[in-house]
Image (spheres, coloured by chain):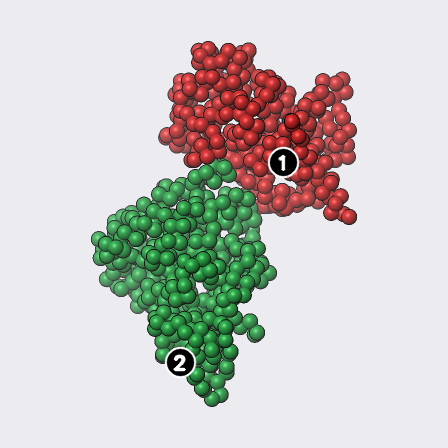
């Protein structure tokens, strides 16, 4: 395998406390050097002057829809979308058809990944069989298969006892549990945030309680089990406050937020455009500020896209009947640059922590850094280039994007996966 | 001085987006159309050659007939399409249905739908004008306009009036459209219902909230009583019919404590003995039948204005 030398970029690698102009050398698919003025014979050279060089992003919440809904997305199309967004590693959520809840289904997915993925795909398996919230999957066996985490994403386990049992098993097997925190009795088939907007639109609301009561419960249960717990896609002020308090008290809790929840408020749904229908729903201005503060002060560990592709037929229908969720792999970095970096909420090292280093650490995978010897997963970004999100430009199979028509700043120029240019603006 | 705005909207989807001037324009247009219904030949040629489709996903004979009569008095051709939502669920999407109807070269689609925002979505996809005849819990603009028209006719003005809306506010598109229309024209609106039928943060629309029917009636110039839809609610918290009448029903005794000439309205059909007693429904304060008559004038105005605006828009586009 050849050599790749990235010259003169601003290298941001918080794992190694690097934020300076450096050259990066990749050799045989691995990082071989990060230093000033590296010389390498016969290396392919990329001039990154004026650009930012980052470890490839790690997105810990992605729906690739395969197997079962290949009309929405596939491992092939989803990983291409990832690369275009600077994401070199994704965690694939298990709510597929069939769900990823057994050794057999894991092997099936692994085969698909092996033959079609163009980025690294890690697998999350279900906590319960068929994600029905009734019977636990064989967590020990899943661990042996290299599963990175377990989650019943899309729903929360209702019985406290079963959830506690799951967390104990996760702990015993060194497995991370990721929780979708929603009490469906409280969210009660709502489709937008409960409040003045749901009232104005004549839609059923989803209360904030439906989320934060479950956040509170899952943190409590994790403490009882002595396990770690990761809370996915938090959306409201109370959840941020609860997690902040729990962390202060030493709880082993981490959490992530999506770009749409730190960028958009519930007012975006006023035109009944289902590209703003997601679960959890877009919340109020106060919630968005609390989320931003949580990102700033470290309460929120990670940014994940919750990339949720849906076909036009499932989105271009009456708002209440439309599916929840939006795609996000191709826009998450630019959204973070536009909404967080440019507004002083995060700096470059902070942004890399949230989008690469922390998710890798939370998942316990060897990614998110430019350390010597690690896989050469690298992103080169033009931080100043502005672009307008257009459906024609999206490579994801589905186009249900909440940022359509918006101008975002920051464009990925190259995404390098194991030392090879997997995406490049000139290729 | 009342300055009247020109009507430039291709659609009439709700009252939330309309300015006071636009609402006043519809009302004054309705006033001039009201006279048509008193003529021997109840027809004007305003929409001759135009086709109006009543696309009803939810059964409502009253509203459908009112739109049909309005369209015919303007000399339009009318097509009625009643679609069971359940069959649509399996097949064609709303947009596809809309496009198919448009392919028939119709000019106005009047749509009634059980999902909020359906009219807005349809309007985004169609060149034809869309008039919302009620969408989910969201809006029912022509109903509110006819309520307001009737009130103005009875009391001479809207600004400064105290109007109470009683009943299931949470699930009522009539309530929402009335709130937008009345508050924009300067009325003071109070909503009255048991707590579980008041939607969250409703005060932010500028109304007051009470759970006490006596307080809602006291000093009110008008009370708009909504139809209770007990059949669709499975919640235990929902009051039973008799219980509801006892606490919120409009009776003669309750009206006696209100202003003598309080106007009693109801969008119909009435559940007699549940929302109000027969005595009140048929009594001197009731304007329920006048509302029905005025509905035609208001709908004529709505159809006429959107058709005219659409002609202007498409004319421009053709240049
Ligand atoms: Zn989720």
Provide the secondary structure element on which disc 2 rests: strand
Label 1 – label 2 distance at C-alpha: 65 Å
**Colour red belongs to chain:** B
> Left or right of B134: which side holds B239?
left
**Coordinates of residue B39 in the picture (x, y in percent):** 75, 18
Please state the chain letter of the residue tagged with numbered disc 2 in the rendered image.
A
Q: In this view of the protein, which residue sits in the foreground, A357 or A350? A: A350
**Residue located at (55% from left, 63% from top):** A386
Against A13, residue B106 (above or below) is above
CB at disc 2 and ligand 1 closer than 8 Å:
no
Against A131, residue B64 (above or below) is above
Against A64, residue A28 (above or below) is below
Q: Tell me, yes or no, whether dots 1 and 2 are on the same chain.
A: no
Q: Which residue is mark 1?
A: B12
Specify the colour of chain A: green
**Coordinates of residue B32 in the picture (x, y in percent):** 71, 24
State yes or no: discs 1 and 2 in contact (Cβ < 8 Å). Answer: no
> Left or right of B298: which side holds A63?
left
**Residue located at (77% from left, 48% from top):** B319
Against B8, residue A396 (above or below) is below
**Coordinates of residue A194 in the picture (x, y in percent):** 42, 40
- Which of the 4 quarters of the picture holds residue A186? top left
Please state the chain letter of the residue tagged with numbered disc 1 in the rendered image.
B
Q: Which residue is mark 2?
A: A35
- Which of the 4 quarters of the picture holds residue A206? top left
**Label 1: how many residues lie within 10 Å, few (<14), some (14-19) or many (20+)?**
many
CB at disc 1 and ligand 1 closer than 8 Å:
no
- Which of the 4 quarters of the picture holds residue B47? top right
Q: How many badges with numbers are in the image?
A: 2
Screen quadrant of the N terminus of chain A: bottom left
Provide the secondary structure element on which disc 1 rests: loop
């Amino acid at each position: 395998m050849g050599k790749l030398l990235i010259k003169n970029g601003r290298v941001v690698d918080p794992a190694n406390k690097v934020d300076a102009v450096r050259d990066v050398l990749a050799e045989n698919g691995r990082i071989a050097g990060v230093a000033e003025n590296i010389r390498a014979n016969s290396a392919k050279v990329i001039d990154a002057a004026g650009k930012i060089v980052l470890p490839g992003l790690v997105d810990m919440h992605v729906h690739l829809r395969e197997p079962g809904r290949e009309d929405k997305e596939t491992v092939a199309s989803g990983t291409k979308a990832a690369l275009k967004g600077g994401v070199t590693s994704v965690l694939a959520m298990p709510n597929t058809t069939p769900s990823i809840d057994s050794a057999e289904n894991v092997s099936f997915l692994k085969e698909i990944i092996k033959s079609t993925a163009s980025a690294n795909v890690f697998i999350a398996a279900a906590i319960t069989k068929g994600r029905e919230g009734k019977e636990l999957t064989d967590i020990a066996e899943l661990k042996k298969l290299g599963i990175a985490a377990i989650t019943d994403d899309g729903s929360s386990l209702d019985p406290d006892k079963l959830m506690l049992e799951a967390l104990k098993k996760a702990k015993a097997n060194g497995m991370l549990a990721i929780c979708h925190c929603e009490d469906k009795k409280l969210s009660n088939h709502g489709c937008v945030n409960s409040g003045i907007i749901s009232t104005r639109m004549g839609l059923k609301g989803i209360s904030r309680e439906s989320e934060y009561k479950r956040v509170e419960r899952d943190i409590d249960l994790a403490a009882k089990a002595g396990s770690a717990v990761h809370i996915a896609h938090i959306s409201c002020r109370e959840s941020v406050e609860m997690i902040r308090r729990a962390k202060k008290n030493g709880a082993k809790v981490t959490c992530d937020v999506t770009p749409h929840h730190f960028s958009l408020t519930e007012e975006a749904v006023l035109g009944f455009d289902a590209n703003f229908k997601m679960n959890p729903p877009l919340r109020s201005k106060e919630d968005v500020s609390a989320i931003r503060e949580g990102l700033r002060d470290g309460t929120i560990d990670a940014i994940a896209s919750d990339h949720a592709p849906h076909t036009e037929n499932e989105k271009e229908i009456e708002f209440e009947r439309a599916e929840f969720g939006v795609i996000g792999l191709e826009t998450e970095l630019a959204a973070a640059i536009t909404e967080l970096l440019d507004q002083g909420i995060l700096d470059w090292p902070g942004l890399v922590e949230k989008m690469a280093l922390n998710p890798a650490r939370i998942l316990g995978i060897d990614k998110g850094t430019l350390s010597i010897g690690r896989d050469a997963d690298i992103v080169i970004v033009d931080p100043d280039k502005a672009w307008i999100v257009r459906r024609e430009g999206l490579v994801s199979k589905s186009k249900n994007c909440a940022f359509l028509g918006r101008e975002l700043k920051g464009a990925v120029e190259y995404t390098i996966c194991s030392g090879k240019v997997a995406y490049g603006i000139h290729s | 001085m009342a300055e009247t705005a020109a009507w430039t909207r291709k659609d009439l989807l709700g009252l939330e987006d309309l300015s006071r001037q636009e609402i006043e324009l519809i009302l004054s247009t309705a006033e001039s159309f009201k006279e048509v219904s008193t003529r021997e030949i109840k027809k004007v040629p305003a929409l001759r050659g135009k086709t109006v489709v009543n696309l009803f996903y939810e059964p409502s004979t009253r509203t459908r007939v009112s739109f049909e009569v309005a369209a015919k008095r303007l000399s339009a051709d009318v097509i009625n399409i009643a679609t069971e939502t359940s069959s649509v669920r399996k097949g064609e999407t709303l947009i596809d249905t809309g496009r198919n109807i448009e392919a028939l070269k119709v000019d106005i689609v009047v749509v009634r739908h059980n999902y909020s925002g359906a009219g807005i979505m349809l309007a985004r996809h169609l060149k034809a004008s869309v008039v919302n005849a009620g969408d989910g819990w969201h809006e029912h603009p022509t109903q509110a306009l006819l309520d307001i028209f009737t009130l103005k006719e009875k009391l001479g003005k809207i600004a400064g009036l105290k109007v109470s809306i009683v009943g299931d506010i949470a699930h009522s598109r009539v309530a929402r459209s009335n709130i937008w229309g009345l508050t924009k024209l300067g009325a003071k609106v109070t909503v009255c219902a048991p707590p579980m039928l008041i939607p969250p943060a409703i005060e932010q629309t500028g109304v007051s909230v009470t759970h006490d029917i006596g307080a809602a009636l006291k000093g009110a110039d008008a009370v708009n009583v909504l139809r209770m839809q007990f059949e669709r609610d499975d919640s235990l918290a929902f009051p039973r019919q008799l219980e509801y009448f006892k606490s919120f029903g409009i009776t003669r005794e309750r009206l006696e404590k209100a202003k003598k000439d309080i106007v009693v309205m109801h969008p119909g059909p009435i559940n007699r003995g549940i929302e109000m007693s027969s005595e009140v429904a048929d009594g001197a304060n009731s304007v329920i039948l006048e509302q029905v008559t005025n509905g035609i004038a208001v709908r004529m105005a709505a159809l006429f204005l959107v058709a005219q605006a659409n002609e202007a828009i498409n004319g421009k586009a053709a240049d």
